[in-house]
Image (cartoon, rainbow, N blue to C red):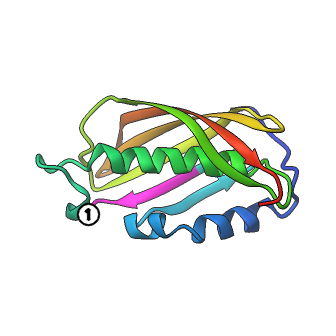
């Protein structure tokens, strides 16, 4: 991933505050594991109540983690006072979501004043081995004065 300069010198605290203000992420147990300008890694433990009928974590949960990772990666490059909103995403589900925990890594591909494009990958972690389970390409829109 390319290196980016954040427009908001306080991007780290601002991004953490926006992430922490999302009840959905708390409900899913998703947390920030790593945060850099234009990049983020989120983590989530396995919970049976997040599974579908075969015991795999539901695709909607994995998609929510990927979407949020894209949004927060894009948000790290927004100016102070801006907000972020997903306008489109494409998800490829590559393998069943089976693991002890899950990692969602996203990075900005092309930042813009209004539109930013990101890519994300979801991994299932079993013991210490990671397995790629899904990818996402997301388009996000900056919201001025949010």
**Left or right relative to 135: residue 87:** right
Residue 122 lies, in percent from the top left, at: 42, 41
Q: Quadrant of the C terminus?
A: bottom right
Q: Nearer the viewer, residue 90 or 36?
A: 90
- Extreme-left residue of the structure: 54
Residue 48 lies, in percent from the top left, at: 20, 62
Is the residue 83 above or below the residue 134 in the image?
below
Residue at image coords 85%, 45%:
5
Q: Is residue 132 magenta?
A: no
**Left or right relative to 53: residue 77:** right
Residue at image coords 47%, 64%:
25
Q: Report the predominant secondary structure element of the magenta stretch.
A: strand
Is the residue 27 above or below the residue 69 in the image?
below
Residue at image coords 35%, 51%:
61
Which residue matches tag 1? 47
Residue 9 lies, in percent from the top left, at: 88, 59
* Other residues around mark 1 within 10 Å, as few (<14) / some (14–19) / many (≥20): some
Highlighted range, magenta: 41-46
Residue 59 lies, in percent from the top left, at: 31, 43
């Amino acid at each position: 991933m390319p290196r980016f300069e954040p427009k908001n010198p306080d991007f780290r605290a601002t991004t953490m505050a926006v992430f922490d203000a999302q009840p959905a992420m708390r409900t899913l147990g998703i947390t920030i594991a790593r945060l850099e300008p234009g990049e983020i890694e989120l983590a989530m433990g396995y919970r049976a109540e997040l599974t579908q009928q075969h015991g795999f974590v539901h695709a909607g949960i994995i998609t929510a983690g990927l979407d949020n990772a894209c949004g927060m990666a894009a948000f790290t490059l927004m100016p102070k006072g801006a907000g972020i909103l997903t306008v489109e995403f494409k998800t490829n589900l590559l393998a069943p979501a089976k693991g002890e925990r899950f990692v969602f890594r996203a990075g900005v591909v092309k930042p813009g004043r209004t539109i930013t494009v990101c890519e994300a990958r979801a991994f299932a972690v079993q013991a210490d081995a990671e397995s790629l389970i899904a990818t996402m390409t997301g388009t996000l829109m900056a919201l001025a004065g949010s």
